Image (cartoon, grey):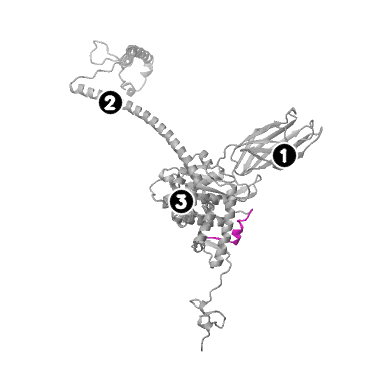
């Protein structure tokens, strides 16, 4: 049959109506690209539901954390994940470590024994300067009821330091730090000129992230009318004035002319997340009250943060013993310095997970040596580190939301959900990288300069202390050497005199002691003679009774009496006075 022009161009139609040139090699017709419901990247996966958590007012979950950290490890370091300076074992690592009611990190190691090798190729590889551990904390309210969950990051700086005796630290990066201060007696204020008839007491102040909660009690006897309303109160911190507090009243009695009033409850102020001060000034009501200064103690480790540091230290010690590069070196599990870094606070109740992700992504952009130096930074220098603030986290969340939408569109277009395949397109790869990181080399260089100055000053102080200690040690050693030389000279002199036949001079005794000793010697014989006479008299009086004893007893030898012999007495022993009565009895 003669072919038509269309057939000659390869567009011959089969009975099914499909062009022959589009038949697959295996004889099957390929499916047309369509929408995908998930994205995968190196054993991590997110779906459309997870992607919805990138919206406003939504919480980041574990799947999004793992997905974006893996992307960051592959794209942010110039050499890819082979040069990633931060290891990561997943958002579920710490929860699994503590599972099965284990009491320590060493015991919990068996729950995650293969994670380090399988997910990071080993925690103690030379490329790693830090170990990122997300913590998902169960929160409780004042009544012990569940109050949701909260993400924060434990960043372990220089994990092998426990064995190599280098500085190491566990930095707790919490965007919703909590602290409480009770005042006993309460802080008091009053309206000026009210003769203390209108008073204010503050018994407690509490901070939970960006929220400051003040417990107060205001009273008035009605002499000057109704009590001022508490809603007009203002809180001053770091030059910022916080207004319009949320009011929670247990007693709401404003009173009036001649009518006593009382307000008791809490004032909750929302802070700017960049506020870092521990000192606040409260202006209560519409004015008239003397301002109160409220001061927190510095942030300290919570019970959970202490447990996290202890468990991670135990886990690293066990991991080193089992899989460390030098197992013969002892790993000191308590060598890490645990501290709370003074970071910016979140200004909502949803972005804690984004703060964890942002801190991890920023650490991936640092060099290993830079991270190791952070273990020696003081809290003052760490406070000046360019930690992410709420505005930057909000911008990051928007970028992640956009790039996820872009990846889902590319996956539908290419017909694959594997992001590693998709980012072979260089333009798309660049877009993904820009969504994960920002250029902030100048900020890090500035902070690094501050750190180097501190370390240099600390080294100068250390050198001065070392030099001073060295002088003391040298002086002590000089005295020891001098004493040793003197003893050796005396020993040599004594040996020479011994060889020459000279007797070494006897040690002289104090005159007072020798005189007292000779006097004691003169007194002792007189005492012994007096005792001997007393014994003789007692034995003479009891001689008659002894004569009635058996002959065996009479023949028993008596021990000779001790004492000095008189001059001129022969060597043959004469009977002692004590034995003469018994001998007379035998003669009779």
The residue lying furthest to the front in this view is 5
* Camera-nearest residue between 571 and 347: 347
The Cα–Cα distance between marks 2 and 1, rounded to whole angstroms, is 84 Å
Q: Residues within 10 Å of mark 3 (few under 14, many from 20)?
A: many
Which residue does the numbered mark 3 point to in the structure image? 85
Q: Is residue 479 magenta?
A: no
According to the picture, the residue beneath numbered tag 2 turns out to be 485
Residue positioned 60% across, 56% down in the render? 54
Let me know if residue 21 appears in the view: yes
Quadrant in the rendering for residue 281: top right
Q: Is residue 267 above or below residue 565?
A: below
Q: Secondary structure at mark 2?
A: helix
The Cα atoms of the two marked residues, 3 and 2, are separated by: 58 Å
Q: Earlier in the sequence, mark 3 or mark 1?
A: 3
Residue at 33% of width from left, 25% of height from top? 479
User: What span is in magenta?
Assistant: 44-56
**Residue topped by disc 1:** 232
């Amino acid at each position: 049959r003669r072919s038509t022009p269309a057939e000659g161009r390869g567009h011959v139609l089969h009975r099914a109506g499909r062009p022959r040139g589009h038949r697959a090699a295996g004889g099957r017709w390929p499916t047309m690209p369509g929408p995908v419901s998930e994205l995968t990247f190196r054993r991590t996966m997110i779906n459309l539901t997870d992607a919805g958590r990138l919206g406003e007012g939504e919480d980041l979950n574990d799947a999004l954390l793992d997905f974006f950290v893996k992307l960051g490890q592959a794209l942010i370091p110039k050499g890819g994940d082979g040069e990633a300076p931060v290891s990561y074992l997943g958002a579920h690592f710490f929860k699994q470590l503590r599972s099965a009611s284990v009491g320590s990190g060493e015991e919990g190691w068996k729950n995650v024994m293969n994670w380090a090798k399988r997910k990071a190729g080993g925690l103690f590889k030379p490329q790693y300067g830090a170990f990122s551990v997300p913590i998902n904390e169960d929160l409780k309210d004042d009544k012990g009821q569940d109050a949701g969950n909260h993400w924060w990051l434990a960043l372990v700086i220089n994990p092998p330091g426990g064995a190599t005796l280098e500085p190491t630290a566990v930095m707790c990066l919490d965007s919703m730090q909590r602290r409480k201060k009770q005042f006993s007696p309460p802080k008091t204020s009053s309206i000026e000129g009210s003769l203390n008839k209108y008073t204010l007491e503050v018994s407690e102040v509490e901070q939970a992230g960006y929220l400051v909660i003040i417990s107060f009690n205001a009273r008035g006897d009605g002499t000057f009318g109704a009590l001022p309303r508490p809603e007009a109160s203002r809180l001053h911190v770091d030059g910022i004035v916080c207004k319009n507090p949320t009011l929670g009243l247990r007693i709401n009695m404003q009173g009036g002319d001649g009518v006593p009033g009382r307000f008791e409850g809490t004032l909750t102020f929302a802070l700017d997340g960049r506020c870092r001060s521990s000192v606040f000034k409260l202006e209560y009501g519409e004015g008239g009250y003397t301002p109160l200064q409220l001061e927190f103690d510095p942030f300290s480790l919570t019970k959970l943060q202490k447990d996290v540091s202890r468990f991670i230290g135990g886990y690293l010690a066990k991991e080193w013993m089992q899989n460390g590069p030098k197992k013969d070196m002892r790993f000191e599990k308590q060598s890490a310095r645990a501290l709370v870094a003074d970071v910016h606070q979140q200004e909502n109740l949803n972005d804690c997970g984004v703060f964890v992700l942002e801190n991890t992504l920023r650490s991936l952009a640092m060099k290993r040596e830079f991270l190791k130096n952070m273990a020696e930074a003081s809290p003052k220098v760490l406070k000046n580190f360019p930690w992410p603030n709420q505005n930057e986290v909000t911008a990051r969340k928007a970028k992640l939301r956009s790039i996820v939408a872009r990846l889902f569109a590319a996956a539908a277009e290419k017909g694959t959900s594997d992001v590693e395949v998709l980012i072979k397109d260089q333009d798309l790869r660049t877009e993904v990288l820009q969504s994960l990181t920002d250029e902030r080399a100048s900020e890090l260089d500035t902070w690094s300069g501050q750190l180097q100055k501190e370390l240099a000053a600390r080294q100068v102080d250390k050198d001065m202390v070392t030099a001073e200690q060295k002088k003391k040690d040298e002086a002590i050693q000089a005295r020891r050497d001098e004493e040793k030389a003197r003893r050796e000279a005396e020993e040599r002199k004594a040996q020479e005199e011994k060889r020459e036949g000279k007797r070494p001079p006897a040690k002289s005794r104090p005159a007072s002691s020798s005189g007292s000793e000779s006097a004691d010697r003169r007194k002792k014989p007189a005492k012994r003679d007096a005792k001997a006479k007393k014994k003789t008299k007692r034995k003479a009086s009891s001689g008659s009774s002894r004569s009635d004893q058996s002959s065996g007893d009479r023949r028993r030898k008596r021990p000779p009496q001790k004492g000095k012999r008189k001059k001129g007495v022969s060597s043959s022993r004469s009977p002692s006075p004590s034995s003469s009565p018994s001998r007379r009895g035998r003669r009779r």
